[in-house]
Amino acid sequence: MEIKQPISPFSAVLKKWRNYRKLSQLALSLEANISQRHISFLESGRSRPGKDTILQLADALDMPLRDRNQLLISAGFSPIYNERTLNDAAMTSINSALNMMLAHHEPFPALVVDRNWNLHMANQATNKLLGLIGPPDSTLFAENKLNIYRLTFSDKGFRPFISNWQEIANPLLLRLQREVNADPDNSFLNALFDEMQTLAGSCHYSSADIAATIAPVLSVHIRVANMELKLFSMVSAFGTALDVTASELKVETFFPADELTRQFFKTQSE
């Protein structure tokens, strides 16, 4: 009787990510410029990968840096991407760039979040906007930081003040679903998406909408103090980051969609 060898940790992780990306072995071989036969041997455990091969596969699978490190570790190699905290001395230039972006965007809101949409930095305009609805409830926090999705979707956050909720709920859910698809091993993000679907309530969401085209900007209308502020947001990231923490940071900047909103924030900054 032939005894089946257990699948190696690397083989299991590689196959899992290939399935995540819905690629056949042939499709992956073309993307990675590695023969289909070699990929088959890697997944069955008949071949052991070199570091260069692992990095080629990770790039072809568009894996986040955090998961590329895990793929290397699963094959017995040391991780090559550092994961520094924002207060690390090596992150000084990143912090300076972020602070410059936030300050330059005044008097309009701008903030920095991590891969789980937990708030790391915010400018004064953001703090003033948050102040319009009072101190954030403890249920809006995750990992000891204010979670922007919970802040937006919860009745204890901005949800009661958003007058165009039916317009923005599905696009925001779609954006989060796309991030879950890009980083499927992120258990927090998966749980957050399920939580937001529940909070969205009557805004029906279908997984068939994942491929739908999302507008480049999203307009949010916030009704407070007998006025309606209209903002649209844009999200950017470090496209060439080689540090795990830096690669996961996102900067969301808000712009006034009408003159009343522009004047409101300008007045607040005086």
Image: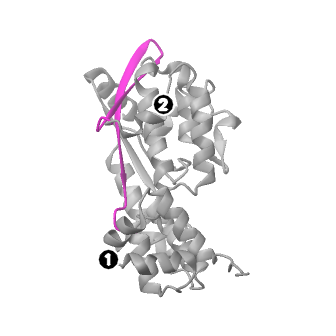
- Judge whether 183 appears above or below 79 on screen: above
From the viewer's perspective, is 218 left or right of 169?
left
Residue located 35% across and 65% down the image: 27
Instruction: Using the numbered discs, state the Cα–Cα distance from disc 1 to disc 2 in whole angstroms.
Output: 35 Å
Q: Secondary structure at mark 1?
A: loop
Q: How is the image coloured?
A: one colour
Q: Is residue 227 magenta?
A: yes
- Residue 113 is situated, as x and y percent measured from the top left of the image, at 49, 50
Q: Pointer 2: what residue?
A: 206
The one of 107 and 139 positioned closer to us in this rendering: 139
Q: Which residues are magenta?
A: 214-241
Residue 268, picture quadrant = top left
From the viewer's perspective, is 133 left or right of 101?
right
The one of 172 and 48 positioned closer to us in this rendering: 48
Can residue 8 be seen from the camera position used here?
A: yes
The tag earlier along the polypeptide, 1 or 2, is 1
- Asked if marks 1 and 2 touch (Cβ < 8 Å), the reply is no
Residue located 50% across and 56% down the image: 183
Q: Amino acid at mark 1?
A: Asn
Q: Amino acid at mark 2?
A: Ser
- Judge whether 109 appears above or below 44 on screen: above
Mark 1 surroundings within 10 Å by alpha-carbon count, few (fewer than 14), some (14 through 19), many (20 or more): few
- Residue 182 is situated, as x and y percent measured from the top left of the image, at 46, 54
Q: Pointer 1: what residue?
A: 33
Q: Secondary structure at mark 2?
A: loop
Main SS category, magenta section: strand
Q: Is residue 237 magenta?
A: yes
- Residue 192 is situated, as x and y percent measured from the top left of the image, at 60, 42
Residue 186, picture quadrant = bottom right
